[in-house]
């Protein structure tokens, strides 16, 4: 367990250094006063927690501080950590046993980390003993198909592709049918993030979603949006747009290791109602973890010496 905490702590270094670490050091043994509240508000907003979520957090923390007669900023820090923890749902590993195959569609804007996350998920599920098949439904760029092929080879799983510019719906259909024929456990569908207009992108996502259901009733069983953590609150607006097009049921937060805006995690459930299921903590195949609420909170607040 120590190792996994270290991994989270390492990956959260930027978020900690730029923002939450300041809360951790600022809130020492001093008395709580108006200035501490102002400073806290400022730091949380800087940390990309979002204005609404920040104000809600401060409101609740003020009530607790008053009710319990707390006077030290250190005590306030502990209240804050508890309240922030409540904003995050601890996810469980998705159920991959009920449906065969379990179909997972991955969406998100360009460059957010979809293809990389799919490669990592394929490796993860394979390690769990599942057979996996990838579907390259991002047919707009030859490079996108090639990139997924590279992942399929690396992880050693089959992949269904089609020609560049062919219909993403058709390859989705073929992919799911192939998975059924081959008795595969998990299908991961990579979709395009880059289209001429946003309208087309949304229409295409809807189509892939719909066609998946035609190939297998009830599919896709999971539709996840990949958010680039470095985009902070902007990422939440993207997620809102995608949720209007298709029913999403979770988010993957990629690039937490290169982001200083890890605070966006707190707004994801409050603002768009989605649990964060996985976190990308690096570029390597093993750098995808089930989102861990406790390690996340401890990781962002840990001080330089690693104490909590
Ligand atoms: N450090 C780090 N880099 C990541 C992570 N996830 C993805 N990346 C990098 O982000 C870049 C974009 O990732 P892709 O997986 O190609 O993103 P995409 O959403 O498929 O992009 P498009 O297909 O162009 O829409 C690549 O250089 C990845 O290596 C992560 O968790 N940590
Ligand atoms: Mg891609």
Image (tube, rainbow, N blue to C red):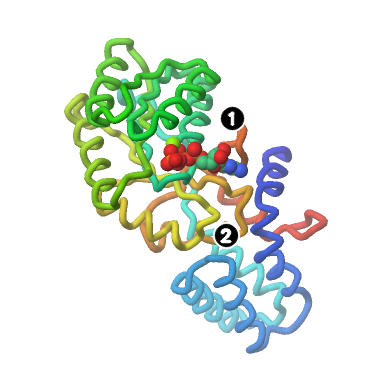
**Viewer-closest of 66 and 148:** 148
Answer whether residue 143 is visible to the viewer in this image.
yes
Element carrying mark 2: loop
Look at mark 1 in the image and give the residue it sits on. Answer: 285
Answer whether residue 280 is visible to the viewer in this image.
no
Look at mark 2 in the image and give the residue it sits on. Answer: 261
Q: Please, is residue 74 above or below residue 224 in the view? A: below
**Viewer-closest of 168 and 245:** 168
Q: Please, is residue 149 above or below residue 47 in the view? A: above
Q: Please, is residue 219 above or below residue 19 in the view? A: above
Element carrying mark 1: loop
Q: Quadrant of residue 32?
A: bottom right
Q: Position of residue 221 (x, y in %)?
A: 30, 34
Which residue is at the far top?
Answer: 182
- Mark 1 or mark 2, which is nearer the start of the sequence? 2
Q: Position of residue 285 (x, y in %)?
A: 59, 30
**Viewer-closest of 70 and 42:** 42
Q: Which residue is rendered at x = 39% and y = 23% of the image?
A: 134
Q: Please, is residue 67 above or below residue 304 in the view? A: below
Labelled disc at residue 185: none
Which residue is at the far left?
Answer: 214
Q: Which residue is rendered at x = 36% and y = 16% of the image?
A: 184
Q: CA distance from mark 2 to mark 1?
A: 23 Å
Q: Quadrant of residue 6?
A: top right
Q: Position of residue 8 (x, y in %)?
A: 66, 46
């Amino acid at each position: 367990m120590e190792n996994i905490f270290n991994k989270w702590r390492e990956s959260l270094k930027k978020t900690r250094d730029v923002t939450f670490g300041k809360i951790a050091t600022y809130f020492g043994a001093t008395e709580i006063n108006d200035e501490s509240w102002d400073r806290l508000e400022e730091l949380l907003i800087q940390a990309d927690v979002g204005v609404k979520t920040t104000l809600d957090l401060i409101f609740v923390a003020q009530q607790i501080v008053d009710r319990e007669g707390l006077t030290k900023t250190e005590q306030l820090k502990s209240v804050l950590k508890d309240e922030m923890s409540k904003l995050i749902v601890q996810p469980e590993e998705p159920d991959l046993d009920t449906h065969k195959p379990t179909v997972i569609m991955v969406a998100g804007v360009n460059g957010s980390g979809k293809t990389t996350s799919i490669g990592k998920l394929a490796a993860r599920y394979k390690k769990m003993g599942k057979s996996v098949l990838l579907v390259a439904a991002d047919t707009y760029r030859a490079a996108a198909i090639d990139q997924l092929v590279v992942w399929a080879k690396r992880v050693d799983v089959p992949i269904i592709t089609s020609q560049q510019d062919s219909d993403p719906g058709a390859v989705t259909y073929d992919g799911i049918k192939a998975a059924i024929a081959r008795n595969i456990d998990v299908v991961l569908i990579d979709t395009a993030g880059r289209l001429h207009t946003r309208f087309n992108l949304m229409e295409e996502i809807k189509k892939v979603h719909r066609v998946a259901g035609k190939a297998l009733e009830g599919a896709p069983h999971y539709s996840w949006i990949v958010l680039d953590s470095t985009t902070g609150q902007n990422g939440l607006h993207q997620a809102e747009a995608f949720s209007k097009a298709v029913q999403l049921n979770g988010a993957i937060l990629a690039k937490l290791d290169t982001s200083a805006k890890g605070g966006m995690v707190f707004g994801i459930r409050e603002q768009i109602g989605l649990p964060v299921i996985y976190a990308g903590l690096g570029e390597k195949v093993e750098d995808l973890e089930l989102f861990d609420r406790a390690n996340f909170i401890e990781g962002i607040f840990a001080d330089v010496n690693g104490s909590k």
